[in-house]
Amino acid sequence: MIVKWLRESLVASWLLLLFRLYVGYEWLTSGWSKVTGGFDAAGFLTGALAKSGGDHPAVQGWWASFLEHVAMPNVGLFNILVPYGEVLVGLGLILGGFTWLAAFFGMVMNFAFLFSGTVSTNPQLLLLQIFIVVAGTNAGRIGLDFFIQPHFRNRYGRRR
């Protein structure tokens, strides 16, 4: 019942707009500060790896292995992906364009930060993004998706 309401209700789309604006602002400001402030993921990755040891590690071994063998050797790529990814997620949510996709990639980043032992606002943002993703196209009804979705539906929709 709640899923149907999230996906179809005009009232829900207004509530989701508030969620989108808040979460989008958080992503946009975080990403923009990284873009303009000379972000370097090496310190974050080193800190996450340090949290993978001891009796009760905050970072699981499989994730630490990924960080050590994939992220650290490609830190230059992550120095680009993280800040610009955050900016794009923020813009997508604020403008309501490709809303579902923006929220999904925001969730991916929140999970990556949580797996790396950083709690901060990640659980809160993740929860709000779950509502946005579950709502599907209704989450962007008050935004650019109102104009974008019909075009994609007409052009790439199911063919009989």
Image: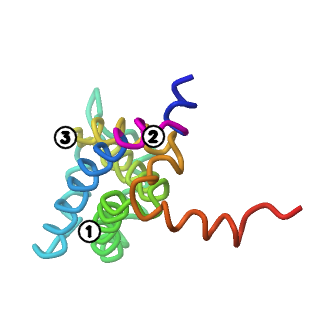
Quadrant location, the N terminus: top right
Distance from disc 3 to disc 1, alpha carbons, whole Å, reads 17 Å
Check residue 150 for magenta coloring. Answer: no
Write down the region rendered in magenta.
8-15
The CA span between labels 1 and 2 is: 33 Å
Q: Earlier in the sequence, mark 1 or mark 2?
A: 2
Camera-near label (1 vs 2) is 2
Tag 3's secondary structure? loop
Q: Residues within 10 Å of mark 1 (few under 14, many from 20)?
A: many
**Amino acid type, callout 1:** Pro
Which residue matches tag 1?
A: 83
147 and 92: which one is in front? 147
Q: Decide which of 119, 126 is in the foreground and name it.
A: 126
Query: Who's the residue at 61% across and 70% down the image?
Result: 151
Instruction: Look at mark 2 in the image and give the residue it sits on.
Output: 10
Within-10-Å neighbours for mark 3: few <14, some 14–19, many 20+: few
Kindly identify the amino acid type of the residue bearing the numbered disc 3: Ser
In which quadrant of the rendered image does the C terminus lie? bottom right
Q: Residue at x 28, y 44 (%)?
A: 18
Q: How is the image coloured?
A: rainbow
* Tag of residue 120: 3
Q: Is 103 or 31 nearer to us in this picture? A: 103
Residue 120 at x, y percent in the picture: 19, 40
Whether residues under marks 1 and 2 lie with C-beta atoms below 8 angstroms apart, the answer is no
